[in-house]
Image (cartoon, rainbow, N blue to C red):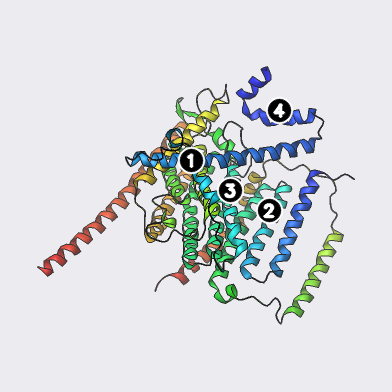
């Protein structure tokens, strides 16, 4: 079976994503971990791009890299002790987390085996973004509104905490 | 020969033509598209990077003329080779890494900020259909990648192991994140009218004529939105009066203080290319992009129109930079959150309501344009009266003090 250029790109992106993900936990400097996390997010965005899910790819960059990663980096910078010293890479919870990790792996393997994966490429509908927009204001209007309300509450709460008294 | 003429007349066909050429040379479909894409990326890269060389010369020359100076005039005709000389100088300078700096992110930060701006360049349609990536989510893509600029500055500031650099990095994040809000709201208003986020379709949607002769540019339909976009773009481009991020005369430069030589130059490259990209986007989104007379018959004219519009916006950016003093950080934040954000919300509201009114398209356009101008005048009036009151208060305090001492 000949390898198509698309598969080459997929393998490169996967290596990037998984490698960066591994470095997040292996890096001893918390700031470096955050940067590796950005790299991993980029890889996932590229995978979405490869699947022609443009909206998801861009949203991934906008939300995970533009907002969440910046927030993590900010928080890391403001916690002085974590920035300067080299961190220990394990703590007293390592036993519990090993159990959880194995359970999660089992769950994922179960899902992998049970789902009937399509082997043929299905054509992507053209204007996905308009379809997403329509879905937001028709079928999923209540979750959509609840989420916006939640964000508003978070916004007001943040201002209430931060304001001068 | 005939085919070549056709290609020059309609540049959007060059891509498919090149693809067919590669296929006829015996490449498979996939390999041909990979080769085409890689060449396209290289072309875009070269275009963006070389444009910076010219932009720096232009910026210095325009600023000099506006301030009644001559500007660079020694190297080459009109000083055109000045930037080349500067590049040679920067390349030969010592590359210093401060003691205790975080090497990896110190070296990555300039690359990240240049990468970010080149990525944005991919969605700009320079002619009808002549766009590197015809993305359905074009505007969202622009917003996503312009958010990465803050990340680059933060990395540079932190890794320099210098508290002034770190403070400068925080300033950049504060300014970029704040001004992104009004910028996105104005983009939202435009998307509401056009019903698309694709930059090429946005330019195409502005081809309608109201009353038979008025072009449907969004800058004419929503002048207030254009003004807000322009001001927010000044801040996003870190230009005067919002260049307090690198105020050399007041604070020690900013996040890039520890950088030297070519790495320092990369941040400046990002700065100049950012201005170009923002003007190109303003031209595409608000001034009709490649729209113009006879563009339907001869599509190559679109590139000329687009170039003229972009240059005009860029000139306006330079004009503001050469004219106005810079703001303080508190003024910058107050202006964003108390003026621009509410104003941009008004713009979105106007667009959403008026565009759904059951009247003819001409009347709708007239209403939208009129309400925008009214909103702009009211906003300027409110700012003016507030400022006047503050000046009066200060004058009163001064009078009272001098009366007391006398």
Q: Nearer the viewer, mark 2 or mark 4?
A: 4
- Are labels 2 and 3 assigned to the same chain? no
Q: Which residue is mark 1?
A: B55
Q: Quadrant of the C terminus of chain A?
A: bottom left
Decide: is A11 above or below B278: below
Q: Chain of mark 1?
A: B
Q: Quadrant of residue A26?
A: bottom right
- Where residue A132 appears, as percent x and y from the top left, is 65, 48
CA–CA distance between discs 4 and 3?
30 Å
Secondary structure beneath dot 4 equals helix
Q: Residues within 10 Å of mark 4 (few under 14, many from 20)?
A: few
Q: Residue furthest left?
A: B406
Q: Nearer the viewer, mark 2 or mark 1?
A: 1
Disc 3 target residue:
B140
Residue B223 image offset from top left, x and y in percent: 41, 40
Give the residue pinned by disc 4: B17
Q: Quadrant of the N terminus of chain A?
A: top right
Q: Chain of mark 2?
A: A
Badge 3: how crowded within 10 Å, few (<14), some, or many (20+)? many
Comparing labels 2 and 3, the label whose residue is closer to the camera: 2
- Mark nearer the N terminus (1 vs 3): 1
Whether the residues at callouts 1 and 3 have beta carbons within 8 Å, the answer is no
Query: Please, is residue B393 above or below residue A98 in the view?
Result: above
């Amino acid at each position: 079976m000949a390898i198509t250029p698309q598969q080459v790109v997929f393998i490169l992106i996967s290596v990037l994503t998984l490698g960066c993900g591994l470095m997040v936990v292996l890096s001893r400097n918390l700031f470096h971990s955050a940067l590796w996390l950005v790299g991993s997010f980029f890889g996932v965005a590229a995978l979405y791009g490869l699947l022609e899910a443009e909206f998801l790819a861009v949203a991934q960059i906008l939300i995970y890299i533009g907002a969440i990663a910046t927030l993590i980096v900010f928080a890391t910078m403001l916690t002085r002790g974590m920035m300067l010293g080299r961190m220990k890479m394990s703590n007293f919870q390592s036993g519990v987390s090993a159990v959880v990790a194995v359970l999660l792996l089992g769950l994922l393997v179960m899902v992998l085996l049970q789902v009937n994966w399509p082997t043929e490429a299905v054509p992507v509908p053209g204007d996905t973004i308009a379809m997403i927009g329509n879905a937001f204001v028709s079928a999923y209007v209540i979750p959509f509104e609840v989420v916006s309300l939640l964000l508003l509450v978070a916004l007001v709460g943040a201002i209430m905490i931060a304001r001068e008294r | 020969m005939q085919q070549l003429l056709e290609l020059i007349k309609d540049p959007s066909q060059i891509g498919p033509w090149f693809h067919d050429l590669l296929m006829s040379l015996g490449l498979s479909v996939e390999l041909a598209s990979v080769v085409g894409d890689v060449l396209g990326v290289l072309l875009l890269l070269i275009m963006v990077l070389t444009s910076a060389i010219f932009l720096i010369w232009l910026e210095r020359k325009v600023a000099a003329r506006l301030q009644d100076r001559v500007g660079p005039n020694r190297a080459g005709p009109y000083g055109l080779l000045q930037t080349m000389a500067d590049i040679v100088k920067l390349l030969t300078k010592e590359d210093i890494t401060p003691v205790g700096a975080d090497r990896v992110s110190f070296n990555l930060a300039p690359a990240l900020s240049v990468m970010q701006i080149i990525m944005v360049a991919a969605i700009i349609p320079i002619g009808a259909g002549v766009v590197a990536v015809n993305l359905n989510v074009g505007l969202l893509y622009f917003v996503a990648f312009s958010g990465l600029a803050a990340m680059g500055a933060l990395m540079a500031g932190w890794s320099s192991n210098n508290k002034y650099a770190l403070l400068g990095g925080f300033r950049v994040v504060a300014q970029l994140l704040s001004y992104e809000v009004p910028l996105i709201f104005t983009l939202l208003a435009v998307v509401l009218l056009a019903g698309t986020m694709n930059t090429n379709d946005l330019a195409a949607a502005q081809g309608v004529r109201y009353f038979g002769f008025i072009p449907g540019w969004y800058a004419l339909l929503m002048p207030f939105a254009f003004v807000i976009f322009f001001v927010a773009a000044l801040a996003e481009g870190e230009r005067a009066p919002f260049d307090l991020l690198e105020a050399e005369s007041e604070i020690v430069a900013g996040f890039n203080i520890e950088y030297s030589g070519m790495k320092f130059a990369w941040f400046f490259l990002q700065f100049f290319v950012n201005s170009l990209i923002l003007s190109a986007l303003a031209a595409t989104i608000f001034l009709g992009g490649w729209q113009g007379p006879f563009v339907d018959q001869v599509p190559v004219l679109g590139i000329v129109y687009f170039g003229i519009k972009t240059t005009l916006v860029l000139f306006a950016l330079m004009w503001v930079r050469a004219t106005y003093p810079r703001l303080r950080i508190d003024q910058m934040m107050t202006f964003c959150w108390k003026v621009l954000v509410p104003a941009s919300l008004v713009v979105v509201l106007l667009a959403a309501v008026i565009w759904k009114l059951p009247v003819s398209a001409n009347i709708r356009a007239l209403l939208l344009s009129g309400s925008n101008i009214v909103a702009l005048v009211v906003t300027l009036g409110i700012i003016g009266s507030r400022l006047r009151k503050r000046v009066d208060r200060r004058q009163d305090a001064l009078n009272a003090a001098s009366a007391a001492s006398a």
